[in-house]
Image (cartoon, rainbow, N blue to C red):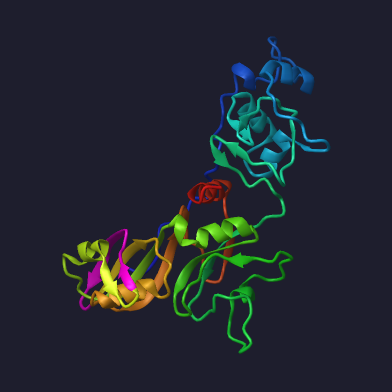
Amino acid sequence: MRTMSPRAHDGRDRPGGRGQRDGGAGRRGGASGGKAAPDADLAAEAGHDSLTDVPGGVRLQKVLAAAGIGSRRHCEELIGEGRVEVDGEIVRRYGARVDPDHQIIKVDGRRIPSRQDLVYLAFNKPAGVLTTMSDDRGRPTISDFLGDRAERLYHVGRLDFDTEGLMLLTNDGDLAHRLAHPRYGVAKTYLADVAGPPPRDLGRRLVTGIELEDGVASADKFRVIDQAGSRALVEITLHEGRKHIVRRLLAEAGHPVSRLVRTQVGPVTLGSLRPGSTRALTTREIGELYAAVGL
């Protein structure tokens, strides 16, 4: 039977794909194609808006570049093409000064992580690790894998002691709170090694809902990945966050879990991240997480 190895994640995606380099408001040079025009000339070419510059603020293209959108030249093209918003208003001035700590900046309708002090990580939690930052009994915790980080990171939700896989870690308290709140229903996907073989109607039963001691629970999606003899590898997606919900749901359906790995939270996938390792989320992933919880 195949092992639990989800698809590798391609972290190259980011919002604001490459714009056209010729024509329109994104062009830096004059009609003769000479040297780049001064900022004032660029602003005149690109048009005006009613956004008030923040005194002592940071140039918009610099904020975009620092967020990983692309080079400053590319970011100027995005601004000139009207693909950048600040606090809900399209801005076409390359030299516009903004406050990245307090203003909401979007590219192609997707919010970007403009604050440089915020950290967004994917972590592959091994089995036998507590979902906490400290333990008075000396058991392994998440913090044992993070090294000496200056930031105080929050774990988004929890994984059981014996459950492996993807966790999100961040010091963005607003995002962490919303991702963990049942109101926003962020979907999570798991691979489970269960007693088998599963009957044909198992997926229908799980999606329809199964009565547990604390109410009905249901899956959003279910499929059998592989099966051999008395074991099966299944994939289940659900948006509930009740304690031990996946194990309880499958056990009640007659297929107790022997191993459980979370492979996806919202748009973020575990991919090829090794157990005990972390990686920084991409700009696209962060923007999609914002969108998933209405930020």
Q: Could you tell me residue 206's position as x and y percent?
A: 26, 65
Within the magenta stretch, is there residue 35? no
Which residues fall within the magenta stretch? Answer: 215-230
Residue 224 magenta-drawn?
yes
The answer to which image quadrant residue 256 occupies is: bottom left
In this view, the residue farthest toward the top is 32
Residue for point 78% across, 20% down: 40
Q: Residue furthest bottom?
A: 137
Residue 104, horizontal then vertical, whole percent: 64, 41
Q: Is residue 193 visible?
A: no
The number of numbered badges drawn on the structure is: 0
Q: Residue furthest right?
A: 56
Question: Which quarter of the rendering shows the N terminus?
Answer: bottom left
Relative height, residue 109 to residue 280 (above, below): above
From this viewpoint, is residue 30 visible?
yes
Residue drawn at x 36%, y 67% is 191
Residues 243 and 15: in front is 243
Q: Quadrant of residue 142?
A: bottom right
- Identify the residue shown where x is 17% and y is 69%: 199
- Chief secondary structure of the magenta portion: strand
Residue 219 position in % (x across, y down): 31, 63
Left or right for 295, reference 194:
right
The residue that appears at 56% across and 47% down in the rendered structure is 295
Q: Nearer the viewer, residue 185 or 153?
A: 185
Q: Where in the figure is residue 3, as x and y percent of width and height? A: 35, 69
